[in-house]
Structures are given as structure tokens and as C-alpha cells.
Amino acid sequence: MTDVRERMADAAALLLARDGYQATSFTEVLETSGAPRGSIYHHFPGGKDELVSLALDRQAARVIGGLDRLEGRTPGEVVESFARWWRLGLEKSDFAVGCSLVAVTASAGAGALREEAGTLFERWIVRLASLFEGAGVDAAVAASFAGELLAAVEGAVAIARAQSSFTVFDRVVERLRAEADALGGKGSDD
């Protein structure tokens, strides 16, 4: 069982992904997490940005953990699995929830939180690239494609939310899968 601080951070990550930075309040976090009111400044004396920072860190770690489970997969399988996680999140939330890192990047303004989101995005790109390299893809190609994959999927998530439709999302993933299959390495026809 997670402690109150972690529950609050996980609630904040969900609220950020659904409503953005500005709309994520301590009141909403308390309601969503079930934490007692006195928990706010006890666990987050630095205020909202401290809570959001932990929320981003925990969300980023979950994504890295998921990517770690893709070790040994072909590039196409990595693309399919990565995209499927985002698609499932959209399905389960009826298009209400996107990515907490994107939300902070778009709505928190310049500063430490946006920089942190950038650092965490880079960790995802590096981990994706390492999966492609592990499948035998050239390092430079793997790094470039990992960035393209993350940017394309995040953009496809945003469009799917705005349109309440998977049409663009599925087309993007189909193209990414074809690109991944053409990268070479293990499991490709090249």
C-alpha cells in the first residue's frame, strides 16, 4: 500500500493529465487521493510545485518501468506496446486523460517544472532508443526514431483527446510501426 504522500502525488499526476497544471488544486488532490486535509503542508511544505514534481517523477518512473518490460522485443513490438498503453489510457478515461508531462509543459509556464518535464521526456527517449539499439538498430537511428516516436504518440494522444476519436491516433501508430519494421535489427525483414 502506498503512503499518503505517494497517493497524493499519484492523484496529482492523474489530475494533471486530465485537467492541466492550473486546474489541479490541492482540494482536488485531497478528494481524489482520500488524504486528510492536514496532509498538504505536512507532506509538501514546498507547496504545489513540490507535489507536481513528485507526481511527474512517479509518472515518468511508471513509463520507464513499462519500457523496461519491453526488453528484447523487436522495434515494431516496442512501438505497438508503447502506443497501446496510451490508447488504453484514452479508452479507459473516455478521452479525458492524456500525459501529465505534456500538461505541465503546456500549462505550468516557464521554470523548474517545465525543465523537469523536459528532462523526464529525455529519459523516455533514451530508454526507447536503448530498446531499439538492443534490437540491433544503429545507435544514431535508434535515438532519432525514439524522439520521433515519443513526439508522434504524444501528439496523437492530444488529437485523440480533442476529437474524441482514435482515427488519427491509429493512423500515426500504423505509420510508426511500419517505420519501426524498416529500421533493421532483430525481427525485421531487412
Image (tube, rainbow, N blue to C red):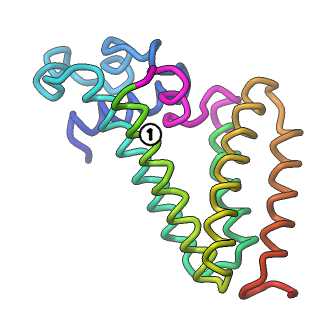
Q: Total of numbered circles in the picture? A: 1
Residue 157 x, y percent position in the rendering: 70, 38
Mark 1 crowdedness (10 Å alpha carbons): few <14, some 14-19, many ≥20: many
Residue at point 43%, 32% (across, down): 114
For label 1, the residue is 117
Tag 1's secondary structure? helix
Residue at point 33%, 27% (across, down): 33
Residue at point 30%, 19% (across, down): 30
> Nearest the camera: 114 or 31?
114
Residue 130 x, y percent position in the rendering: 54, 73
What residue span does the magenta drawing correspond to? 91-110
Left or right relative to 93: residue 127: left
User: For the view shown, which residue lies furthest in the front direction?
Assistant: 140
Residue at point 81%, 25% (across, down): 163
Residue 66 x, y percent position in the rendering: 51, 61
Q: Is residue 136 above or below residue 25?
A: below
The type of residue carrying mark 1 is Ala
Residue 171 x, y percent position in the rendering: 88, 48
Q: Look at the image and tell me in which quarter the C terminus lies.
A: bottom right
Determine if the magenta segment contains residue 98.
Answer: yes
Left or right relative to 56: residue 44: left
Left or right relative to 53: residue 182: right
Q: Is residue 13 above or below residue 41?
A: below
Determine if the magenta segment contains residue 159.
Answer: no
Left or right relative to 77: residue 28: left
